[in-house]
Image: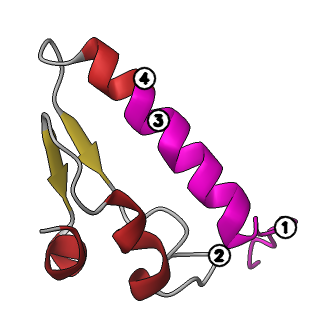
Amino acid sequence: QARRWNMTTMNCADILDNVNDFIEKAERAAPRFHFFVTRVGCGLAGIEDAKIAPMFKGVKGNYSFANEWREFVQ
């Protein structure tokens, strides 16, 4: 039996707010931690990489990104 997901997708403005909050907290924690940022929002939610990945463009610190995002964040 297939599993059904009951979920709603956040809009890009709300996602950007959360991304900015994450970056702020991650910068305070760095350099003690390394963050691998997954393709958040691009799987089940179905948002295009080109819409989410640029939200992380120019971040400095201990970040790694999925290969699909490298062109957008560097």
Range drawn in magenta: 1-24
Q: Callout 3: helix, strand or loop?
A: helix
Residue drawn at x 87%, y 66% is 6
| Residue pointed to by mark 4 | 25
Quadrant location of the N terminus? bottom right
Residue drawn at x 80%, y 68% is 5
Q: Measure the C-alpha gap from mark 4 to mark 2.
A: 24 Å
Classify 18 as above or below 35: below
Upstream in the sequence, badge 1 or badge 3?
1
The reply to whether dot 3 and dot 4 touch (C-beta < 8 Å) is yes
| Residue pointed to by mark 2 | 45
Label disc, if present, on residue 8 of the rendered structure: 1
Q: Callout 1: helix, strand or loop?
A: loop
Classify 51 as above or below 36: below
Amino acid type assigned to the residue bearing label 4 in the image: Lys
| Residue pointed to by mark 3 | 22
Q: Measure the C-alpha gap from mark 3 to mark 2.
A: 19 Å
Of residue 25 and residue 46, the one placed in the foreground of this image is: 25
Upstream in the sequence, badge 1 or badge 4?
1
Q: Is residue 3 magenta?
A: yes
